[in-house]
Amino acid sequence: MALASIFFGEEAFNQLREVLRSGDYTKVGLLVDSNTFECCYPNFMEALAMEVPQLELIEIEPGEESKSLEILASLWESLGELQFDRNSLIINLGGGVVSDLGGFMAATYMRGIDFINFPTSLLAMADAAVGSKTGINFGAYKNRIGSFSDPLMVGIIPDFLKSLTEQELYSGWAEMLKHGLISDLQHWNALYQFDLEEKIPSKRLLQESIAIKAKIVEADKKEGGLRKVLNFGHSVGHALESYYASIQSPISHGHAVALGMQVELFISAQKFPWDQVVYDSVQEYLRQYYNWPELPVDQEAFLRLLAGDKKNQASKIRLVLLRGIGSPEIDQEIAPALVWDALTKVVDG
Ligand SMILES: NC(=O)c1ccc[n+]([C@@H]2O[C@H](COP(=O)([O-])OP(=O)(O)OC[C@H]3O[C@@H](n4cnc5c(N)ncnc54)[C@H](O)[C@@H]3O)[C@@H](O)[C@H]2O)c1
């Protein structure tokens, strides 16, 4: 995903109009879910301000359940019925579910057709739609089937965020906080000082955050090394996300990542000489906006999830830790018992 193919605001619509006027495409599909159809589609069409005669609207149900093989198969079928050929284009207008599913649908239909992302959730703008990863869930596993595929372009329209729920806004904000923590003290400070309760993230903050992700992905698309830094907070976060889902008390992905960052930050400060004042301010900020659910975490279940359900739970796991803000260290081997110890201390404050 090249940073150069990510456009903001009116410039994104200019680029899209150019693509549509190029005459390169026989058919154009616009994938939405029912929420983004209601909240974003009217504004999208108005801002596009252009007739797209060959536009086919394709709508799915909102939510993670749509990222399934069944829905994907029904979409392939629809494309066939609508006579989409190899010179067709898909525009994904939605959150991470729409861009993951729509991207993979495009990457696989007739061995791959072009697609464009217009993300509408903060998580998709800062993360899902700009990472070159597409895919669906399979069996019990999230994102098990997928591809590395680049969209032709990505259009970021901050105004779409106005209809997002507070919970979804904070879920995406956690990924932006992560971008600040892994790469840039200045960006972290700008996020820290921003009042998300009062307003949606500014174009400048979005640009900075997306640039951090896009540059990392550009340098290491397939996660050979550098890209692993994006997993900060995610090892513990994923285990917590799965754990709370398993006890029917789900929390958002971003909330889980923010809790994961609290634990991984604690371990970081044990291993590396953090400035205490900086450490306290980061930890307090994360705790203020992302609290721990009342329900206690079951040690055995958590460690099983942390180890990825591997048989040998005694073996060490690898985390991304921080030497300080902007200084990540990948592949840090930690005993699961230490992670549990850190978690209990963080929960107790
Ligand atoms: N490909 C990647 O690199 C990557 C990275 C991170 C996450 N993901 C995936 O992204 C998905 C999560 O993304 P998400 O949080 O955007 O989920 P989502 O697409 O389910 O969106 C969350 C909710 O917000 C609604 N919504 C979206 N935009 C809206 C708007 N502007 N106004 C009102 N409602 C709106 C959606 O309909 C949905 O109900 C997961 O499937 C995750 O695996 C992928």
Image: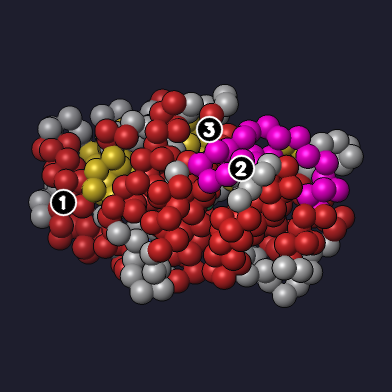
Quarter containing the C terminus: bottom right
Q: Given this view, does label 1 or label 2 mark the residue nearer the observer? A: 2
Q: Quadrant of residue 138?
A: top right
Q: Secondary structure at mark 1?
A: helix
Is residue 32 something that shows in the picture? Answer: no
Q: Which residue is depicted at the point 48% across and 36% down?
A: 133
The residue that mark 3 highlights is 227
Q: Is residue 345 visible?
A: yes
Label 1: few (<14), some (14–19) or many (≥20) C-alpha neighbours in 10 Å: some
Along the line of sight, the residue nearer the viewer: 186 or 45: 186
Whether residue 326 sits left or right of residue 39 in the image: it is: right
Residue under label 2, please give it: 322
Q: Quadrant of the N terminus?
A: top left
* Residues shaded magenta: 319-340
How far apart are the alpha carbons under marks 1 and 2?
37 Å
- According to the picture, the residue beneath numbered tag 1 turns out to be 10
Tell me where residue 249 appears, x and y as whole percent. 68, 69
Q: Main secondary structure of the magenta part?
A: strand
Q: Amino acid at mark 3?
A: Arg
